[in-house]
Amino acid sequence: MTILDIQAEILRLKKERDICIIAHAYQGQEILEVADFVGDSYGLSIEASRAPQQSILMCGVRFMAETAKVLSPEKRVYLANADAGCPMADQMDKAMIESVKTDYPGHAVVCYINTTSELKTVCDVCVTSSSAVEICKKLPQKDILFIPDQNLAQYVADKLPEKNVRYLDGGCPYHAAMTVLDVERARAAHPGALFLVHPECPPEVAALADYVGSTTGIMAYAQDSSAESFIIGTEISIVEHLQFSQPDKKFYHLSGALLCPEMKKTTLMDVYHCVNGTGGEEITLSQEVMIGARRCIDEMIRLGG
């Protein structure tokens, strides 16, 4: 079978079996082309909750599928590749943060959405990279413990000097590996290109950017900008997607090291097997975790919209 053959069969099967396919933007282009919705983890979960289909297939990583299940408890949610995880989401767990909280009395515990549903049950509010500053600003507490991404935490702290933002060592190992030297080399190779970066990158890298924002924010900025060339400081899949959507512009990787192997675990054949009923994993969560994580996410919706 060719890629086109597999895609055609996936499109047929998802319609026949009432399945909504949602795909994170870090997935390959061949997967995005068969998805009903493409975006970041939170946006996908919202779209899944609104979709008329009773089965949701997540092409992404485990915490994303869990978030979709929390927001759509009445639906069956599947993860296309059961082995696809997130190293940042796995860095901290419920027991660890319950223990750490005793060292930070009075602090609002803010968790990045890149966390497990179980961990969200002991946090006060969840945030995305695009809503973190707004939500932290609205919190009544001056003292904030931000987990797990220290670079995003530092970005929030820089934007909100009136808050006391503390954080633990943690974050995305791939975004965190970016250096000022990477930026200097990319700018030298592509003079005049605007540098767009994710706040999960180190602060000294973000400080050199023309724009700092979420993955979807980066894509929207590139689309709306009148500039003709861009250096992209997030997962390298975004360069490919932007090349397809805006062929009249030029897009370059900040570094080849910005590749998430967990996202690349999901293949088009994984999607095929899942819609065919011969692969994937159905996500199940306890009622306690569902309720606790939903409380954390609902607070994000209340404060951030």
Image: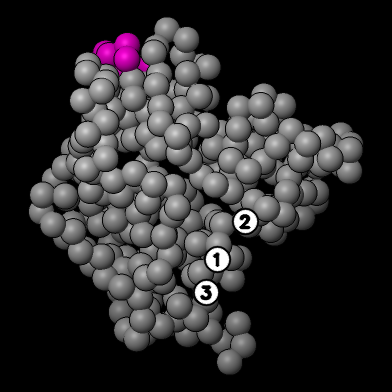
Which residues are the magenta region?
137-143
Identified at 67% across, 31% down, the residue is 205
Quarter of the image that includes the N terminus:
bottom right
Residue beneath label 1, please?
A: 264
Q: Estimate the spatial distance between the alpha carbons at disc 2 and disc 1, rounded to whole Å.
A: 8 Å
Q: Residues within 10 Å of mark 3 (few under 14, many from 20)?
A: some
Amino acid at pointer 1: Lys
Q: Which residue is mark 2?
A: 259
* Location of residue 26 with respect to 174 vertically, above or below: below
Q: In the depicted view, which residue is nearer to us: 183 or 248?
A: 183
- Tag 3 residue: 267
Q: Say which quarter of the image contains residue 143.
A: top left
Q: Is the residue marked by circle 1 packed among few (<14), some (14-19), or many (20+) residues within 10 Å?
A: some
Residue 95 screen position, x and y as percent: 22, 43
In depth, the one of 35 and 231 nearer the eye is: 231
Q: Against 198, is 142 above or below?
A: above
Describe the element under mark 1 as helix, strand or loop. helix
- Which percent across, then down, holds residue 118? 23, 48
Q: Is residue 172 left or right of residue 237?
A: left
Instruction: From the image, state whether disc 3 or disc 2 is nearer to you.
Output: 2
The answer to whether residue 140 is visible is: yes
Please name the amino acid that badge 2 sits on.
Answer: Leu
Queried whether the magenta region covers residue 61, the answer comes back as: no
Question: Looking at the image, is mark 2 or mark 1 earlier in the sequence?
Answer: 2
Q: In the image, 245: left or right of 156?
A: right
- The reply to whether discs 2 and 1 touch (Cβ–Cβ < 8 Å) is yes
The residue nearer to you, when weighing 270 against 185, is 185
Type of the residue with mark 3? Thr
Residue 245: x, y in percent? 67, 55
In the image, residue 36 sits, relative to residue 219, either above or below, namely below
